[in-house]
Amino acid sequence: MGSKGVFDLETHFAFYGAYHSNPVNVLIHTIFVWPIFFTSLVLLYFTPSPFRLLGFEPPFTLPSHVLFFNFGFFFALLYAGFYVLMDRKAGSLAAFLCMGCWVGSCYLANHLGSSLASKVVLGAQVLCWTGQFLGHGIFEKRAPALLDNLVQAFLMAPFFVLLEVLQMVFGYEPYPGFHSNVKEKIDAEIKVWQESKQRKMS
């Protein structure tokens, strides 16, 4: 069974899933969420190393002049660690993708340079966020999760779409009964939201 508290996968998945029950909206997020994560790391490539800001050198250097301990590294590491602690199998895959995105973003950012990279990131972010907001407005007909819980929405988005793909393609679930438990919680959350919406309209 999943961990409790801050690493309770059922609770996190149900929270995010209640805002993404429409299959078209889920597909839109599946396409756009990871590019948002990746392009954010591209931009963070040009941030300094937290070690240097604190006035000391990192304990060791990375095997490339392109890779270094910038804020993008710790951003990716935070996501990776969070996912592994929620589910060892799918979380390990998600962690690999997070760190792979960091490595790829470093090489792309280094190749593009700060000026061109900023323009590419801006264009990609505008496209991806526009697509997601349209998905919520047209298909889900509910405001995005980030308006209710910004941190939880940002942390869960990449893992949510990965788990959706793994479940759809391979029938994966973190443990027996996970998806049925989550569906019950999502249905209950959507019912509460619909009742609240009806009260506001009446």
Image: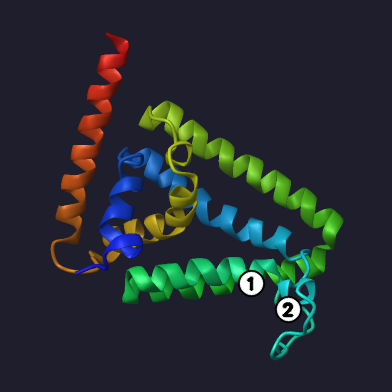
Is residue 150 positioned above or below 108 on the image? above
Who's the residue at 40% across and 46% down the image? 27
Judge by depth and name the residue closer to the eye, 109 or 185.
185
Instruction: Name the spot of residue 78 as percent of width and height, x first.
Output: 52, 68
| Residue type indicated by callout 1 | Phe
Q: Which mark is residue 153?
A: none
- Taking the image as shown, residue 125 lies to the left or right of residue 170, namely right
Crowd tier of the residue under label 1, counting other residues whose Cα lies within 10 Å: few below 14, some 14–19, many 20 or above: many
The number of callouts visible is 2
Who's the residue at 57% across and 40% down the image? 129
- Taking the image as shown, residue 140 lies to the left or right of residue 44, namely left
- Taking the image as shown, residue 130 lies to the left or right of residue 142, namely right
Residue beneath label 1, please?
73
Judge by depth and name the residue closer to the eye, 127 or 193.
193
Instruction: Name the spot of residue 5 as percent of width and height, x first.
Output: 30, 61
Instruction: Name the spot of residue 154 as percent of width and height, x first.
Output: 49, 51
Residue beneath label 2, please?
68
Is residue 127 positioned above or below 7 on the image? above
Who's the residue at 73% across and 89% down the image? 61
Asked if labels 1 and 2 touch by Cβ distance under 8 angstroms, the answer is yes
| Residue type indicated by callout 2 | Phe
Q: Of the residues under marks 2 and 1, which one precedes in the sequence? A: 2
Q: Quadrant of the N terminus?
A: bottom left
Q: Secondary structure at mark 1?
A: helix
Q: Determine the CA span between mark 2 and mark 1.
A: 8 Å
Instruction: Name the spot of residue 202 as percent of width and height, x first.
Output: 27, 8
Q: Residue furthest front?
A: 55
Q: Secondary structure at mark 2?
A: loop
Crowd tier of the residue under label 2, counting other residues whose Cα lies within 10 Å: few below 14, some 14–19, many 20 or above: some
- Taking the image as shown, residue 167 lies to the left or right of residue 133, namely left
- The colour scheme of the drawn protein is rainbow
Who's the residue at 51% across and 34% down the image? 133
